[in-house]
Amino acid sequence: MRSCFVIALVWCVLFLGCSVEAQLKVGFYKKSCPQVEQIVAKVIAQKMPSNPELAARLIRLFFHDCFVRGCDASLLIDSTASNSAEKDAPPNLTVAGYEVIDEIKAAVEAACPGIVSCADIVALASRDSVSFPFNKPLWEVQTGRRDGTISLASEARTNIPAPFFTYSRLVSSFANKSLSVQDLVALSGAHTIGIAHCNGFSTRLFNFTGQNNVNDFDPSLDLTYLRSLQQICQNLANNVTSVPMDPTTSTTFDSHYYSNLKLHKGLFTSDAALLTDARASNLVDKLVDEGNFLDAFKNSIKRMGAIEVLTGTAGEIRKNCRVINS
């Protein structure tokens, strides 16, 4: 029996990448940096009142990081003369919140030098920014991630789901990260906060089928909503103007995203795509209930936060989140 277990364990490590070292867990820094969660929460609490878009920015940063090489803070690494990093790939050019992560990292390093990863700081800051209006953490964050040492713009282009994705492409993209349709629908609910630039959805408003006339728009959009977006964005090439992703409560983390979606007021093609599949559409119906949404979201973001993580002695603990240790 013992020899069989050893063989199975070796097979797991060699072929599945299983780690026999420290795994993610709640309270990973309980002894090495017990104040880390308080430090993160304090900085977020200081920033939120003057920066209502911060929660949306940090959730997006976390999502974009996890979908490329896992949740390893590789998105935070700056490009160099010899390497174009993830943050300079087209899907990440409007990602924001880096300076807040830098500030948190500096505070954590002052208290516990060389202990807490940038990847864990991103996970904690995302949770705390969304939770801030609720005056309590909405989910527990497992920690113990380590920071990656590779960041390639080319990988961001091929791994991050795009706002123009169809349902089948979304499902495939999430499945590649071991995430389910349930996770897809629940995590899409993050679009209940934040803004989007017109060029992320303008093909739905103008020249939808290439006919190049004023009535060539996506017929799945609510007509009144469509006309308001056309008036705001004006043309297909507008990459400056932004609009709320949730037309009703864009700074409140609630289930209105799903209510709006059912009214055909989902902003992106990828939002509307959730109504093209019976299973996904049924989940949308269920998540209109705010309690159901918050439960589903916390479970799905915890699964997302465990994508391809580095633990144990893999990777490193970056001293500066923007630069790989020398």
Image (spheres, rainbow, N blue to C red):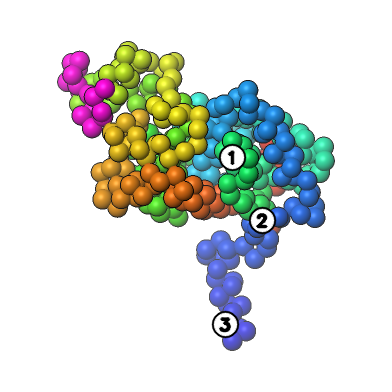
The range drawn in magenta is 210-224
Circle 1: element type: helix
On whether residue 218 falls in the magenta region, the answer is yes
Residue wearing tag 2: 26
At x 71% / y 33%, what residue is drawn?
Answer: 43
Relative placement, left or right, of 169 versus 47 is: left
What label sits on residue 4 in the rendered view?
A: 3
At x 66% / y 28%, what residue is drawn?
Answer: 47
Going from N to C along the chain, the mark reached first, 3 or 2, is 3
Q: Amino acid at mark 1?
A: Phe
**As rendered, which of 266 and 96 lies closer to the eye?**
266
User: Which residue is at the far bottom?
Assistant: 1
Relative placement, left or right, of 97 versus 295 is: right
Q: Amino acid at mark 3?
A: Cys
Relative placement, left or right, of 196 versus 267 is: right
The x and y percentages for residue 62 are 55, 40
- On the image, which quarter does residue 28 sit in? bottom right
The x and y percentages for residue 196 are 43, 25
What label sits on residue 48 in the rendered view?
A: none
The x and y percentages for residue 244 are 43, 25
Q: Is residue 39 visible?
A: yes
- Cα–Cα span, label 3 and label 1: 50 Å
Q: Residues within 10 Å of mark 3 (few under 14, many from 20)?
A: few
Compared to residue 121, the image places residue 237 above or below, namely above
At x 58% / y 46%, what residue is drawn?
Answer: 138
Check the picture and name the quadrant holding the C terminus: top right
